[in-house]
Amino acid sequence: MPSTLLELMRLGGPIMWVILGASIVAVAVFAERILEYRRMGVPLDPFLDGIASLVKEKRYQEALERCDEAHGPAIRVIQAGLLKRDIPLADLRESLQEVAQLQVPRLEKNLTILATVGYISPLLGLLGTVTGMIHVFQTISGAKGTVPVGELAGGVWEALLTTAGGLVVAIPAYVAYNYLASRMAGEVNDMERAGIEMIQILKEGGRIVTSAAVSTPVTTELRAEKPKP
């Protein structure tokens, strides 16, 4: 029985090294996305309450400085609302939608890589199974008599280990992708809320005087554009 990872990799053949490389990529992507989403994780409700208080007191520069100190797509939507607070309502709503759309690629970054690893890892395992069985039958066909079990063991090990390795990588990769996709959806929802709330905050602060301030909610437009993970 193999007792070390290096021995398992040797018995699994070349495909095992490809699977190992895919697992390293998946871990790196997951770690990078988790750190990035955690960096974006500013509690939206308290932040909006603070911005609303500053807007009511006409302290717009301080509100902008608070946005500069925070991170996240929803914060960028709020900041855009503050910077363009003097433009007409229709233009403001369109501007907030555009800012939100520009933030989506930042949220999606590298998720396709993780999904690809989850998809191809079982296929790599299957490929290793096929190559392992080919080695087994090559050994059998090359023998003139009874084939010792030891001579067949190499191909069987390769077939079994690559199959197991592909599944071991694919299952966590799928789970990680779905988790990150749910985090991305949460950030998109925060952007939608931020757009609606900023229009209302500016209206209550006297910057928007029209009575049709939210006749076409920003959330409707953003949902229409939100990509599927």
Image: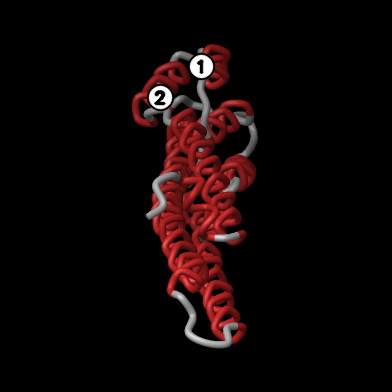
Residue bearing the label numbered 1: 66
Q: Which class describes the residues within 10 Å of circle 2: few (<14), some (14-19), or many (20+)? A: some
Q: Nearer the viewer, residue 172 or 72?
A: 172
Sequence-wise, the earlier of marks 2 and 1 is: 2
- Decide: is 138 above or below 111: below
Q: Residue furthest front?
A: 145
Q: Secondary structure at mark 1?
A: helix
Specify the amino acid type for callout 2.
Answer: Phe
Q: Secondary structure at mark 2?
A: helix
Expressed as whole percent of the image width and height from the top left, the position of residue 2 reads 41, 52
Q: Residue at x 42, y 31 (%)?
A: 41
Q: Which class describes the residues within 10 Å of circle 1: few (<14), some (14-19), or many (20+)? A: some
Residue bearing the label numbered 2: 47
Q: Residue at x 59, y 49 (%)?
A: 21
Expressed as whole percent of the image width and height from the top left, the position of residue 126 reads 51, 72
Give the distance between the C-alpha atoms of the residues marked 2 and 1, in whole angstroms.
Answer: 9 Å
Color scheme of the displayed model: secondary structure
Determine whether label 2 and label 1 are within 8 Å by CB. Answer: yes
Does residue 210 appear in this view? yes
- Decide: is 197 above or below 214: above
Expressed as whole percent of the image width and height from the top left, the position of residue 24 reads 54, 45
5 to the left or right of 104: left
Q: Residue at x 49, y 49 (%)?
A: 7
Q: Nearer the viewer, residue 133 or 183?
A: 133
67 to the left or right of 176: right
Q: Nearer the viewer, residue 73 or 219?
A: 73
Q: Nearer the viewer, residue 136 or 99?
A: 136
Q: Which mark is residue 32?
A: none
Specify the amino acid type for callout 1.
Answer: Arg
Q: Residue at x 39, y 47 (%)?
A: 3
Q: Quadrant location of the N terminus?
A: bottom left
